[in-house]
């Protein structure tokens, strides 16, 4: 029988036998007690290929986007038009960009990083108060590595996943009460994410010269989904043989990522033309990447960038990723205006729920859902 993946039951994702393993297998716990890394985290035959720094002038000239220009009322001004061209270039060549002047201060972002670190530093029993329950894999504290499956090594991270929007998806009882300003800060950050999402989706449409709400329609106020993932990557003694997160593309339209300023070595890598590039960590900036739904809707113009996370032997790292996903009851398909005899439709229409199901089927095999949707 077809499973209903809404909301995602833990047993749907991990299987009955594995759901009990979540708490004892938290990576932070393993890392604390560890002498040797458990075999299941180690890459079997190879080492992680090295990543290179992108030329800094290239990054700054083409991938740094000034958000205030995208959100300006006068998108016809030449500076706004230049920024839209940059956005188009960034998303169609790299599948990502970094935003500055987004309206959230560096001190506020630091506060969010601080409460995230404080949460992960709590004793285990305190964190377990926020544990995922059988009802919904995408709400609560736990470990996502189990879905790496049997064919790949496990991911070296724990996570606190919380649905922020629609508001009625919020499970406030799983939002940490400790540190005591966590909920308030997350509430404010949620508003920032919603505001940024709207501006970016409209700018993406403008950059393609299509109707302004083409992407926004499925991310409307009532039904659009934003889920946030606080990731904790403990120190890892052999970072060249263990993935923080295996290479993947995101099941989102866009993902907005806040990186840890205290980690000097860039931990996040993106793939372009078969080369891995380190994502520079620019304090106060947010990293935005296109996900699979942006690639489908743009009929392949925007690239859902493949990315990976590597751990660090000296410092632990936190990250805060906001996944912006269309209405869970909806379906995505290439936008009509982007299909023509010269540009035939590249992807089949897909229900978001079917996508989620395929994601959990393909991820353990190291495959991408997008490949299964190509026409
Ligand atoms: C993810 C992801 C990046 C990071 O959660 O999908 O790519 O830096 N995270 O944690
Ligand atoms: Ni990702």
Image (cartoon, rainbow, N blue to C red):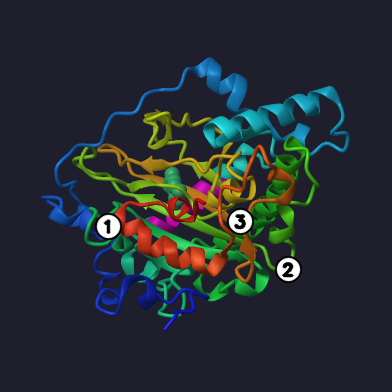
Q: Residues within 10 Å of mark 2 (few under 14, many from 20)?
A: few
Q: Which mark is residue 180?
A: none
CA separation, marks 1 and 2? Answer: 36 Å
In reply to whether residue 38 is colored magenta, the answer given is no
Which residue is at the far left?
A: 35
Q: Residue at x 54, y 48 (%)?
A: 291
Q: Which mark is residue 185?
A: 3
Q: CB of mark 1 within 8 Å of CB of mark 2?
A: no
User: Dividing the image into 4 quarters, which one contains the N terminus?
Assistant: bottom left
The x and y percentages for residue 14 are 32, 71
| Of the two numbered discs 3 and 2 in the rendering, the one whose residue sits closer to the viewer | 2
Which residue is at the far bottom?
A: 1
Q: CB of mark 1 within 8 Å of CB of mark 3?
A: no
Q: Nearer the viewer, residue 86 or 374?
A: 374
Q: Earlier in the sequence, mark 1 or mark 3?
A: 1
Q: Residue 236's image quarter?
A: top left
Above or below for 96 versus 11: above
Q: Which residue matches tag 2?
A: 222
- What secondary structure is marked by label 3? helix
Q: Earlier in the sequence, mark 1 or mark 2?
A: 1
- What secondary structure is marked by label 1? helix
In reply to whether residue 115 is colored magenta, the answer given is yes
Q: Residue at x 43, y 58 (%)?
A: 119
The x and y percentages for residue 116 are 47, 53
Q: Residues within 10 Å of mark 1 (few under 14, many from 20)?
A: many
Magenta-highlighted residues: 111-120
Q: Nearer the viewer, residue 131 or 87?
A: 87
Above or below for 318 versus 18: above
| Of the two numbered discs 1 and 2 in the rendering, the one whose residue sits closer to the viewer | 2
Q: Residue at x 38, y 42 (%)?
A: 308
Q: Residue at x 58, y 42 (%)?
A: 300
Q: Which mark is residue 27?
A: 1
């Amino acid at each position: 029988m077809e499973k209903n993946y809404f909301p995602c039951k833990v047993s749907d994702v991990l299987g009955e036998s594995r759901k009990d393993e979540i708490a004892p297998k938290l990576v932070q716990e393993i890392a604390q007690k560890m002498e040797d890394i458990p075999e299941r985290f180690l890459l079997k035959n190879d080492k992680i290929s090295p990543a290179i720094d992108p030329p800094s002038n290239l990054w700054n000239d083409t991938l740094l986007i000034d958000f205030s220009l995208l959100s300006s009322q006068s998108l016809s001004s030449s500076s706004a038009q230049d920024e839209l061209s940059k956005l188009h270039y960034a998303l169609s060549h790299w599948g990502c960009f970094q935003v500055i002047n987004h309206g959230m201060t560096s001190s506020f972002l630091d506060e969010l990083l601080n409460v995230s670190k404080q949460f992960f530093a709590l004793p285990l029993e305190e964190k377990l108060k926020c544990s995922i329950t059988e009802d919904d894999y995408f709400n609560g504290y736990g470990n996502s590595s189990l879905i790496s499956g049997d064919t790949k090594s496990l991911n070296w991270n724990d996570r606190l996943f919380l649905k922020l929007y629609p508001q009625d998806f919020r499970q406030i009882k799983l939002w940490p009460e400790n540190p005591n300003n966590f909920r308030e800060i997350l509430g404010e950050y949620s508003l920032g994410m919603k505001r940024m999402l709207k501006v970016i989706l409209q700018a993406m449409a403008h950059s393609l010269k299509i109707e302004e709400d083409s992407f926004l329609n499925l991310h409307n106020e009532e039904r659009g989904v934003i889920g946030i993932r606080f990731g904790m990557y403990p120190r890892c003694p052999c970072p060249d043989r263990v993935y923080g997160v295996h290479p993947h593309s995101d099941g989102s339209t866009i993902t907005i990522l806040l990186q840890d300023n205290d980690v000097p070595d860039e931990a996040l890598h993106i793939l372009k033309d078969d080369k891995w590039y380190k994502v520079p960590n620019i304090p106060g900036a947010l990293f935005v990447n296109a996900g699979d739904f942006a690639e489908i809707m743009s009929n392949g113009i925007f690239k859902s960038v493949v990315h990976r996370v590597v751990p660090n032997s000296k410092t632990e790292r936190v990250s805060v990723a906001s996944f912006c996903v269309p209405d869970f009851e909806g379906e995505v398909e290439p936008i009509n205006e982007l299909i023509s005899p010269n540009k035939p439709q590249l992807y089949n229409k897909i229900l978001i729920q079917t996508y989620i199901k395929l994601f959990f089927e393909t991820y353990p095999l190291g495959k991408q859902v997008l490949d299964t949707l190509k026409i």
